[in-house]
Image (spheres, rainbow, N blue to C red):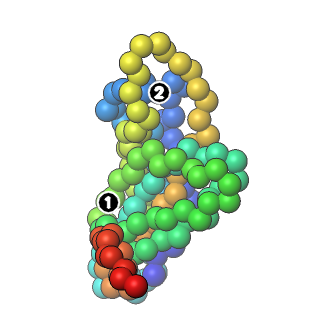
Amino acid sequence: MAKIISVNLTSIPECINVSDNISDITVETEIEFHPLDISLGMEYCLHVYIYDIHGDLDTPFVLPNWDESDVNPISLGRKDDYLGGKKTIITATPEIMIIKTPIALHLGHVNRDTNYISRKLKAFTTITPAISSASKWSEPFTSQIIH
């Protein structure tokens, strides 16, 4: 089983241009693998999510499903805004691995005036092994109820 040792935001610009598609930040995730993971060459999918935090941090609820895992926030007030994310498939080879994930933030589009707004950004990472439970919601559907 892998263990996430640390998650750090690096390469954070002083200002982020809202309408570009450039990688604004880099998330550095340090992972430690169990010796059994290394001996089996276990594959993992690392998911990195960036949120704009409003007040208290939402509690993340992860639905693991290999490379399409979802994080659903349990809101403690104003819901945090999802700003971007990325997934990376990795193989447990060294005992300690550092993954650098560049991410472009999705902040919307500026039409007329330039505004400067401070953001409280946090990264959440989760790692899903190839051999684990899998979860997924169905698509929503509508049905009529007859009385």
Q: Who is closer to the viewer here, 76 or 32?
A: 76
Quadrant in the picture for residue 48:
bottom left
**Position in image of residue 82 (x %, y %):** 47, 49
Could you tell me which quadrant the C terminus lies in? bottom left
Residue 136 showing in the rendered view: no
Residue at 44% from the left image edge and 35% from the top image edge: 107
Q: Which mark is residue 88?
A: 1
**Which image quadrant for residue 68?**
bottom left
Please tell me whether mark 1 sits on a helix, a strand or a loop.
Answer: strand
Whether residue 54 sits left or right of residue 26 in the image: it is: right
In this rendered view, identify the residue nearer to me: 41 or 1.
1
Q: What residue type is labelled 2?
A: Ile
Tell me if residue 147 comes above or below residue 46 in the rendering: below
| SS at circle 2 | loop
| Residue that appears at 32% across and 60% down | 88
Q: What residue type is labelled 1?
A: Thr
User: Residue drawn 39% across and 51% down?
Assistant: 85
- The mark total stands at 2
Task: From the top left corner, tell me how far across and down residue 53 is, in percent.
Answer: 61, 47
Relative image position of residue 39 (x, y in whole percent)? 33, 84
Residue located at (41% from left, 22% from top) = 110
- Farthest residue toward the top? 113
Residue occupied by mark 2 = 16
